[in-house]
Amino acid sequence: MAKTNERPIIIKRRKVVGGDGHHGGAWKVAYADFVTAMMAFFMLMWLLNATTEKQRKGIADYFSPTIPINRISGGGSGAMGGDSVMAEEDLAFNGEVPDRATGAIEAGDSTAAAFAQIEEMLTGSGGESRIADDLLAHIVTRVTDEGLIVELFSLPEAPLFRPGTEEPTDVLLALTDVVEEAFSLVRNDVAVGAHVAAEPIVIARPSVWPISVARAERMHDLLRREGIADARFARVTGHADRELYGIDPLSIRNDRIELVLLRSDG
């Protein structure tokens, strides 16, 4: 047989193993669990440092399976009217506790529950609201470190005060009645602040300061007449046009009243 100089052809077949061997993704799951545990640990450390003893007790009670937390009625029409079989006095109060004699809310573990209830009343966020839609359009609420801020502001076709004066319109009188009803649920101190829109530069004698002060004092007087005790007012302040809303300093939206329910839990 004749010899040939051709080399034999060798075919190599590589076997692919799934999961990339020891470079698989199992370690990522373990690492994610570790990071989650560390985040929970640092969150716990922060809570222990940033809360009071009463607040820590409230948090502990929330996670205790032996303490009933939910006080909200189901709204049923049966014999109990949707209430739980547990009586009101058996339920744990996490926040503000209604006074049985006056209906007011006393300071409890925190004011968060009371603020949430008042926000629902003033904004209709909890569903149906007894406040007319045209009044709801004037109200904005927000919770800050200082407390619950309720902002009442003018609209182009519905100002809170008569132009250039501290005389309230029917809109503000109606809003005052709504606010007093909500604020009567708590005993927190109240701060009143009035803001006004900027005036054109051509004005020879700016009046933003005296008008804002007069409007703050008028709002204070209106709330007192509605039934809020004078002892609850911590301050009454006119801010002039120093804290404008939006980019247009002349906008009527800058004409507003800020009412603050100050925090009482420490």
Image (cartoon, rainbow, N blue to C red):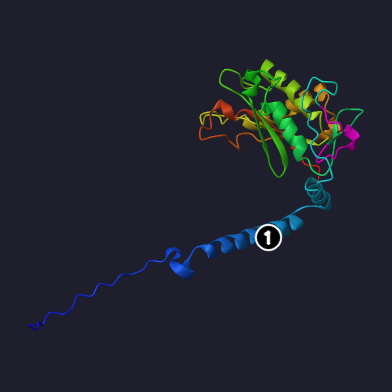
Segment colored magenta: 83-96
| Quarter holding residue 83 | top right
For label 1, count other residues whose C-alpha is less than 10 Å away and answer few (under 14), some (14-19) or many (20+): few
The outermost residue toward the top is 170
- Please, what is the dominant secondary structure of the magenta stretch? loop
- Residue 261: x and y, percent? 76, 36
Residue 65, placed above or below residue 82: below
Q: Amino acid at mark 1?
A: Phe
Going by the image, does 222 lie left or right of 154? right
Reading the image, the residue beneath label 1 is: 42
- Residue 264: x and y, percent? 81, 42
Residue 121 magenta:
no
State the count of labels: 1
| Quarter holding residue 70 | top right
The outermost residue toward the right is 101
Quarter of the picture containing the N terminus is bottom left
- Residue 17: x and y, percent? 41, 66
The outermost residue toward the front is 1
Residue at 50% in and 63% down: 25
Q: Is residue 263 visible?
A: yes
Residue 94 magenta:
yes
Residue at 64% in and 29% down: 256
Residue 189, placed above or below residue 126: below
- Residue 252: x and y, percent? 57, 26
| Quarter holding residue 140 | top right
